């Protein structure tokens, strides 16, 4: 086991706090019952940021090169992208 | 020199856990991804219906569940960190906290289901509820399976099977639990929030 993957516990805690704050921002959007393409874009952006943080730091793929990290990141970039496209097409 | 060493180390970083779990995770994400895309496609033909019934969902329950899963995932990541430092006592403690957060998710989701089903809503009530029930229940089953895996990891930690040198199984189980979290952070905003 390489020591390079040993993410410090402080770093994990900071990432957890960021994830909580991003979740609360989505919750606030839900609480206000906001709608519209810009709101959808904002919420989907938080999904992508949260997903990347989980994949890179919680799953420990940040320093893994090659197919697997890209494939995992594909889920949090491509799926929100398709969702946004779907909402965009129905809004025009 | 040290930069070169660091760069080489990063380039050689292996995949955490068993390769088989990554194929499994990829398959699961593909299935959920297809589900999400179909949801968006079907919604595009039923916007009024989806927007109307989405507001009937208990968003606070969804938020609590998101916070619970993210926190659980954090405890699992910390547990992996702890076992890499040979701190088995802390690893066990963190896994128990992760399981407790998973239990919060299960209790809140069952409370939510009791309200939905208690109101006479079921799979064929309308298209929105077909997606809401099937998507969330499919994910719920993954949470249950994940909790069994976390329980097994805790048992193995108690048995002294994991250490700083040998924690392959720990990383494998942790990766599965993070996948469950990853799916929920897309599912929650899609079904409960964006409109």
Image: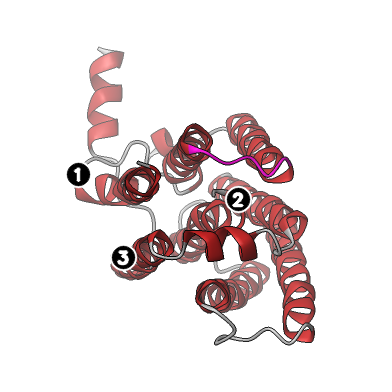
Of circles 2 and 3, which is in front? 2
Q: In which quarter of the image is residue B41?
A: bottom left
| Segment tinted magenta in the rendering | A32-36
| Disc 2 residue crowd, few under 14, some 14–19, many 20+, Cα 10 Å | many
Work out which quarter of the rendered image holds the N terminus of chain B and state it: top left
Mark 3 chain: B
**Would you say the magenta stretch is mainly helix, strand or loop?**
loop
| SS category of the residue bearing label 3 | helix
The chain to which mark 1 is attached is A
Please state the horizontal and vertical placement of residue B35, each as a whole percent of the image. 38, 69
- Specify the quadrant of the image occupied by residue B89: bottom right
Distance between the alpha carbons at the discs numbered 1 and 3: 19 Å
Indicate whether B129 appears above or below B87.
below
Labelled disc at residue B193: 2
Could you tell me if the residues under marks 2 and 1 are in contact, i.e. CB atoms within 8 Å?
Answer: no
Which residue is nearer to you in this view: B18 or A88?
A88
Q: Residue at x 49, y 43 (%)?
A: A47
Q: Which of B50 and B15 is in front in this view?
A: B50
* Residue receiving disc 3: B30
Residue B90 at x, y percent in the picture: 72, 52
Drawn side of residue A72 relative to residue B81, left or right: left
Q: Do the residues labelled 2 and 3 touch (CB within 8 Å)?
A: no
Which residue is the site of mark 1? Answer: A66
Q: Are marks 2 and 3 on the same chain?
A: yes
Across and down, in percent, residue B182 comes to 49, 54
Disc 1 element: loop
Q: How many labels does the image show?
A: 3
Spatial separation of the CA atoms under disc 2 and disc 1? 34 Å
A9 and B114: which one is in front? Answer: B114
């Amino acid at each position: 086991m390489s020591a390079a993957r040993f993410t410090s516990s402080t770093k994990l805690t900071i990432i957890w706090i960021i994830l909580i704050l991003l979740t609360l921002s989505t919750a606030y959007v839900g609480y206000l019952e906001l709608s519209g393409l810009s709101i959808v874009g904002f919420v989907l952006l938080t999904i992508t940021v949260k997903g990347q943080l989980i994949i890179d730091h919680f799953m420990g793929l940040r320093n893994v090169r090659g197919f697997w990290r890209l494939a995992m990141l594909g889920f949090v970039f491509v799926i929100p992208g398709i969702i946004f496209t779907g909402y965009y097409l129905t809004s025009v | 020199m040290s930069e070169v060493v660091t760069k080489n180390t990063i380039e050689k970083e292996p995949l955490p856990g068993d390769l088989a779990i990554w194929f499994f995770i990829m398959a699961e994400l593909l299935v959920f991804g297809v589900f999400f895309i179909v949801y968006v496609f079907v919604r595009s033909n039923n916007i009024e219906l989806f927007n109307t019934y989405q507001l009937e969902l208990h968003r606070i329950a969804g938020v609590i569940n998101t916070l619970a899963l993210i926190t659980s995932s954090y405890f699992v990541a910390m547990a992996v960190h702890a076992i890499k430092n040979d701190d088995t006592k802390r690893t066990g403690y963190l896994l128990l906290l992760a399981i407790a957060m998973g239990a919060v998710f299960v209790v809140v989701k069952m409370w939510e289901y009791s309200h939905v089903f208690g109101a006479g809503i079921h799979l064929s009530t309308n298209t929105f509820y077909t997606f809401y029930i099937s998507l969330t229940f499919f994910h719920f089953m993954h949470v249950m399976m994940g909790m069994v895996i976390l329980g097994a990891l805790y048992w193995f930690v108690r048995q002294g099977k994991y250490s700083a040198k040998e924690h392959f199984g720990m990383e494998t189980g942790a990766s599965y639990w993070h996948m469950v979290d990853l799916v929920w952070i897309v599912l929650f905003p899609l079904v409960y929030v964006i409109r």
